[in-house]
Image (cartoon, rainbow, N blue to C red):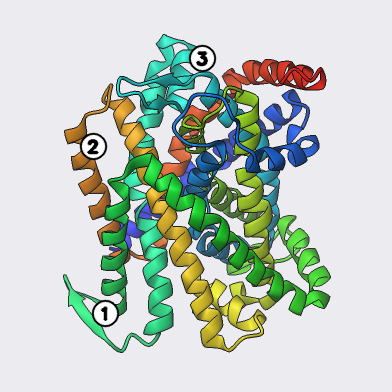
Amino acid sequence: MKDINELISTIDRYVWGIPLIVLILSCGLLLSVRVGFIQVHKLGKALRYMLSDEEEGSGEVSSFGALCTALSATVGTGNIVGVATAIAAGGPGALFWMEIAAFFGMATKYAEGLLAVKYRCRGADGTMLGGPFYYIENGMGKRWKWLGKTFALFGVLAGLFGIGTITQINGITSAANNFFDPDAAHTVSILGSDFTLTTIISGLIITVCAGLIIIGGIKRIAFFSQVIVPAMIVIYVGSCVLIILGHVTEIPTAVVLVVKSAFGLKPVAGGAVGTGIILMSMRSGIARGIFSNEAGLGSAPIAAAAAKTKEPVRQGLVTMTGTFIDTILVCTMTGLSIVMAGSYAKEGLEGVAITTDAFRYGLPFPEKVSEFLLMVCLAVFAFTTILGWNYYSERCLSYLLGGSDKRVTAIYHRIYIAAVFIGPYMTVEAVWNTADIFNGLMSIPNVIALIALSGVVAAETKDYLKRSKQKQI
C-alpha cells in the first residue's frame, strides 16, 4: 500500500506541475482581459441574476436550480478538508494562491456557463445536453470531437474515483469517526485492516441515501440542492464568522502570515524556504482551489446547460457566482479560521481533524457542540457533492458512448454507488492525490477549448452588454 501511495503522489506531482498551473492561470487571465474583468464590474448584477429566474427560455431547471446543482458538487469536502490539507502542505500562503486562482477562475467559470448554453442541444429524450464536450464539438468543429471524448473519459474517472465519490464519503466518515469514536474504541477487521463501527455505519447510511436520490436524475438533485445547499452555506459561513469575530484582533497577523508565506518569507513543511515554498504554496493552493470551485475543470457547464434561459451571457454570470461563493466566501472563512487557530501546524492532525481543531479553538461553544456542527456541515456538503457529480459523470458517460442508454445508466449508477461504498476504506493521502490527478487531466481539454473559444466569449459578452445598455433585454 505504501508503494501505491508513493506512485500516486509521484503522478500527482507530475500532473500538477508548473505547466498545468501556468495553463490554468493563463486561461483565467486571458478570459478576464477579453471580457473586461467582468468578474469585478458585473458581480453585483450576477448576484441579482442568481436570485431571479428568467420567465422564458428552454431548459429543465431554473437558473438558480442549475447553480445550486453546480454548488452542490463544488461546496463539499474541498471547502473544509481541502483547504486544511492545502494549508498543511503548502503553509498559510496556499490560501493566498487559492484566492488568486479563484479571482481569475471567476472569468473562467463565466466563460464555461456562457458556452454551455450557447452550444447546448436537445437530446432524443427531450433533455438539454451541454458541457465542454458539446462546445468543443459544436464550437471548435467536428475534427476536435476526440478532445471532447477525452474530456468525457476523464470526467467519468473523476466522478467515479476522485472528486465525486471517494473523497466525499471519506471526508464524511472521517468527521463522523472523529466525533463519535475518536479513540477507535470499537473496531472491526476488514481484509486485514481495522475500521471503526462508526466508519462502517456512516458509510452505509450515506451510500443508501445517495442511491435513493441518484435514481431521480437532475430534477430531484436540483430540488434537493435548492433547499439544502443555501441553508448549509449560511450555517457554515456563519460559524466561521463567529470564529473570526471572536478573535478579530488576530486577523491582521493571520493576513500578514498568509501573504508572507505565499512569497516564501516563512518556512513551511519540512523547512522549505525560498522558491521551494512558493512553488509548494502555489501548487497546494491552486490544486485544492480548483478541486473546491472547479473553475476550469468543466463540470459546472454540464449543469448550466440544463438552465431555463435564452441568454448565454446571463447564465455565464450566474455560473460565475459559484466560484465567488465557493472560494472567495466559504474557503476564505475556513482558511482564516485554520490560520488563526494555528491548527495546520499541530503534530498528528490531518484532513478534517485540522478544521475540527480550528472550530474547537474558535467557536464560543463546548468542544463537542463545535465538533458536531462541523460534522453536520461536512456531511451535508459532501453528500450533495456526491449527488452533483453523479449527474456530471453520467452526462460524460452518455457523450462518451454516443448517446444515453437506460440499461447502461442503471449499471453506471450501481458502479457509482459502489465507489461511494468503498470510499471510507481508502487512506486520506491516496484519496486526495487521486482526485487531484483526475481533476488535472480533466481540466486540460476544457482549458484548451476555453482558450480557443475566447473570441466567441468576448463577442457574446460585448453584444449582451450593448443590448443591456440599450434596454433591449
**Disc 3: which residue:** 139
- What number is the disc on residue 271? none
Q: Nearer the viewer, residue 52 or 69?
A: 52
**Residue type highlighted by circle 2:** Thr
Task: Give the distance between the C-alpha atoms of the residues marked 1 and 2, in whole angstroms.
Answer: 32 Å
Q: Earlier in the sequence, mark 1 or mark 3?
A: 3
Q: How many marks?
A: 3
Q: Residues within 10 Å of mark 1 (few under 14, many from 20)?
A: some
Q: Earlier in the sequence, mark 1 or mark 2?
A: 1
Name the secondary structure under disc 3. helix
Give residue 441's quadrant in the image: top left
Q: Nearer the viewer, residue 274 or 430?
A: 430
**Disc 1: which residue:** 197
Name the secondary structure under disc 2. helix
Tag 1–tag 2 contact (CB < 8 Å): no
429 with respect to 48 (left or right): left
Q: Nearer the viewer, mark 2 or mark 3?
A: 2
Q: Nearer the viewer, residue 414 or 16?
A: 414
**Disc 2: which residue:** 409
Q: Position of residue 390 (x, y in %)?
A: 35, 45
The furthest residue to the front: 55
**Residue type highlighted by circle 3:** Gly
Q: Is residue 449 visible?
A: no
